[in-house]
Image (cartoon, rainbow, N blue to C red):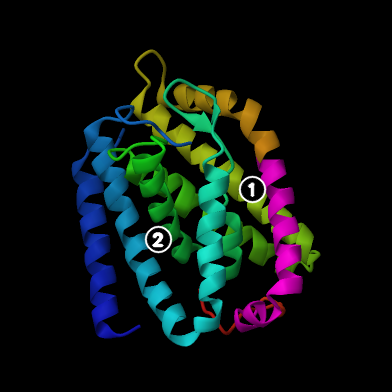
Amino acid sequence: MNKREKGALTLSWIVALAFCVTQNANAMHIMEGYLPMGHCVAWGALCLPFVVYGVIRIQRIARDHRKTLLLLAMCGAYAFVLSALKIPSVTGSSSHPTGTGMGAILFGPAVMAVLGLIVLLFQALLLAHGGLTTLGANTFSMAIAGPFVSYGVYRLCQKCRVKKHVAVFLAAALGDLFTYCVTSVQLGLAHHATASIPAAIGEFMGVFALTQIPLAIIEGIVTAIVVMGMESFAKPELAELGYWRSRQAEVSR
């Protein structure tokens, strides 16, 4: 990472910390108007460092691994299609697959912060799915928290010598579930007038669990099947990403 990239990343963290500290600390697609504006700003600021680093990572991939750009676009399209399958869950929100696990496994979680932001922006503008003021909160839950868990689970499975397709299933499914845990926290922090914050978070998690657990299992299965197909039709690109090795050294995370 050169000095300019380090400077941009450092500045983004400063902005994020400044906004998160100045906003009230009490402070899956959350709809427009369902979070206080202070929360919206704080969540958006918290996303900034991850998005900046994701842009840096994508620039490196475009420069050093151009053969994989088609896979990168496919990961973005996959996330867009799956996360657009909305099932009503709780007032002002919804349950749906996230589709971010595959990109996190192949390219790392930082890249998905950027792709997820783009996906959520287009869904808010074209499908009225989510909202512009809640874009930061939705990006943090679906495009940052979930992918980091997916990537961590996948790497842990590699170290434990779990079969690759089982690892993909677990990574995608658990990343999806964690997304909704974070969404429940976001909603609980914003809407706890008649209960304590932990109780409000627990209530939201309980409502989401009814639909999200089966959806997470389905997403894990679908992602594993898609990756199996890619192993047949995109061998050179996967090799470029170091997918066939236990430790992916060619594309650092």
Which amino acid type is marked by label 1? Answer: Leu
Q: Which mark is residue 114?
A: 2
Q: Quick one: label 2 or label 1, which is nearer the N terminus?
A: 2
CA–CA distance in space, label 2 to label 1: 20 Å
Q: Which residue appears at 29% of the width and 28% of the height?
A: 33
Left/right of residue 96 with respect to residue 245 in the rendered view: left
- Which residues are drawn in magenta? 216-242
Position of residue 246 relative to residue 39, above or below, is: below
Say whether residue 24 is visible: no
Q: Which residue appears at 72% of the width and 78% of the height?
A: 244
From the top left corner, tell me how far across and down residue 51 is, in percent. 35, 61
Element at badge 2? helix
Left/right of residue 235 with respect to residue 199 in the rendered view: right
Which amino acid type is marked by label 2? Answer: Val
Label 1, residues with CA under 10 Å away: few <14, some 14-19, many ≥20: many
Element at badge 1? helix
Left/right of residue 125 with respect to residue 91 in the rendered view: left
Q: Which mark is residue 186?
A: none
